[in-house]
Amino acid sequence: MFTGIIEAMGTLAALRRQGEDMALTVHAPTLDFSDVKLGDSIATNGVCLTVVALGDKSYTADVSLETLSRTGFADAKVGDPVNLEKALMPTSRLGGHLVSGHVDGIGEVKRKSGSGRAIEYWIEAPADLARYIAEKGSIAVDGISLTVNAVEGTLFRLTIVPHTAQETTIARWKPGHRVNLEVDQIARYLERLMQGKAQDKSTSSLTLEKLAQSGFL
């Protein structure tokens, strides 16, 4: 599990095709590798990857065909910057929101504009993910925990403060740029619970009334 609070930025140092899969190497001089070992997970642009080799301030991970089909790694190039976060420790502060590192789909930056010292981005999500995105809800974009400030159909707006832009890959976003999206887990599980209620009313005690009383509706 992750929080969406980026610890460091790295650079794709190597991309090696292995049949339909790929192995990538990330060079990350500012990431603390003191507690990283083989088999650990590192969120790389929001994708949970397993470390299979360690180098001098670098790590290598395998990327499956499934991951390539669902993330922006299919378009990755050597030299691309990536956002990095090591897996959440039990003692860590949960500064963002719970992020699994399992990307749901790819969004596209549609508009960029200034708003005081902040930058606003409108991003279009795939239609099948848009229903999980709510105003003032959380979303992970390229692994960054961000707040949704407005929703219009399949478009949602992010307001990025200077610190976040400086510490992540957001500074290179422009219209047409594709980003990895992971929607809020609560929305997904809530939908599944409601589906179960509709399919079997005799076994589920979850109701719209109870959800409203608990503040979910």
Image (cartoon, helix red, strand yellow):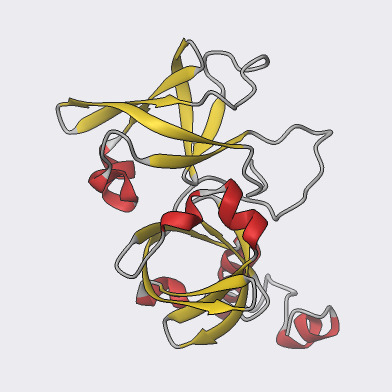
Which residue is pictured at 40% across the width and 58% down the height?
179
Using the image as rendered, state which of residue 187 and residue 31 is in the foreground.
Answer: 31
Using the image as rendered, state which of residue 198 and residue 190 is in the foreground.
Answer: 190
Return the x and y of residue 55 as percentages of the image width and height. Answer: 45, 10
Return the x and y of residue 43 as percentages of the image width and height. Answer: 53, 38
Q: Residue furthest front?
A: 117
Q: Quadrant of residue 6?
A: top right
The number of numbered discs placed on residues in the rendered structure image is: 0
Residue 131 seen in the figure: no
Which residue is pictured at 70% across the width and 55% down the height?
97
- Left or right: residue 69 versus residue 117 is left
Which residue is pictured at 84% across the width and 33% down the height?
91
Which residue is pictured at 42% across the width and 81% down the height?
154
Using the image as rendered, state which of residue 168 and residue 3 is in the foreground.
Answer: 168
- For the C terminus, the quadrant is bottom right
- Left or right: residue 98 versus residue 213 is left
- Left or right: residue 217 versus residue 184 is right
Residue 88 seen in the figure: yes
Residue 216 sits above or below residue 33 on the image: below
Return the x and y of residue 135 as percentages of the image width and height. Answer: 63, 81
